[in-house]
Image: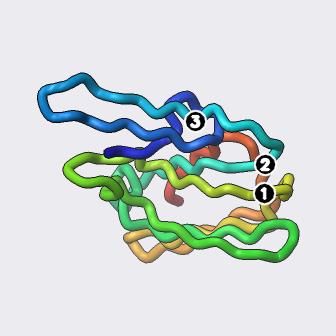
Amino acid sequence: MAFGDIDNDGRMDAVVTVLNGPVKLFHNVSGGNNHWILLKLAGTKSNRMGIGAQTRITTEDGRSQWNEVTTAVGYASSSDSRVHFGLGSNRHLKELEIRWPSGIRQVIQHADVDRILSIQEP
């Protein structure tokens, strides 16, 4: 099983392989007014996909979430390397911090949400 936002709508989808059978796509079509952000990292000194980068967001309500860039989520598969955060009713990020594998620390203030944010390692 592999996970990722197949259609870039902010809702995580799943793809499952079946032995001697067709691939199955579980397309998330759930409703709701929740906000989200996907971080697509590009390393320059670190590896080009940013694998191993640690990310922390702080939402406008003061709550923090952590995640790490990886593709190792499902069994015998590779998932989307983009980092997904569900934000609930928060319409903006107060702060986004990235700790790259190279040791570089990058901070972005006041990011908009409901989009894919591409970030290059400085």
Above or below, 11 against 105 in this view is above
Spatial distance from mark 3 to mark 1, Cα to Cα? Answer: 17 Å
Q: Residue 73: x, y in percent?
A: 35, 57
- Dividing the picture into quadrants, the one containing residue 62 is bottom right
Left or right: residue 24 versus residue 41 is left
The reply to whether dot 1 and dot 2 touch (C-beta < 8 Å) is yes
Task: Label 3, secondary structure: give it.
Answer: loop
Q: Badge 2: few (under 14), some or many (20 or more) residues near its Cα, within 10 Å?
A: some
Q: Residue 51: x, y in percent?
A: 36, 59
Above or below, 41 against 56 in this view is above
- Residue at image x 58%, y 45%? 118
Q: Nearer the viewer, mark 3 or mark 2?
A: 3
Q: Which mark is residue 88?
A: 1
Spatial distance from mark 3 to mark 2, Cα to Cα? Answer: 14 Å
Q: Amino acid at mark 2?
A: Asn
Of the residues under marks 3 and 1, which one precedes in the sequence? 3
Q: Amino acid at mark 3?
A: Asn
Spatial distance from mark 1 to mark 2, Cα to Cα? Answer: 5 Å
Task: Label 1, secondary structure: give it.
Answer: strand
Q: Amino acid at mark 1?
A: Gly
Of the residues under marks 1 and 2, which one precedes in the sequence? 2
Residue that numbered label 3 is attached to: 28
- Dividing the picture into quadrants, the one containing residue 33 is top right
Q: 56 or 89: nearer the eye?
A: 89
Of the residues under marks 3 and 2, which one precedes in the sequence? 3
- Residue at image x 64%, y 72%? 65
Q: 83 or 53: nearer the eye?
A: 83
Residue that numbered label 2 is attached to: 34
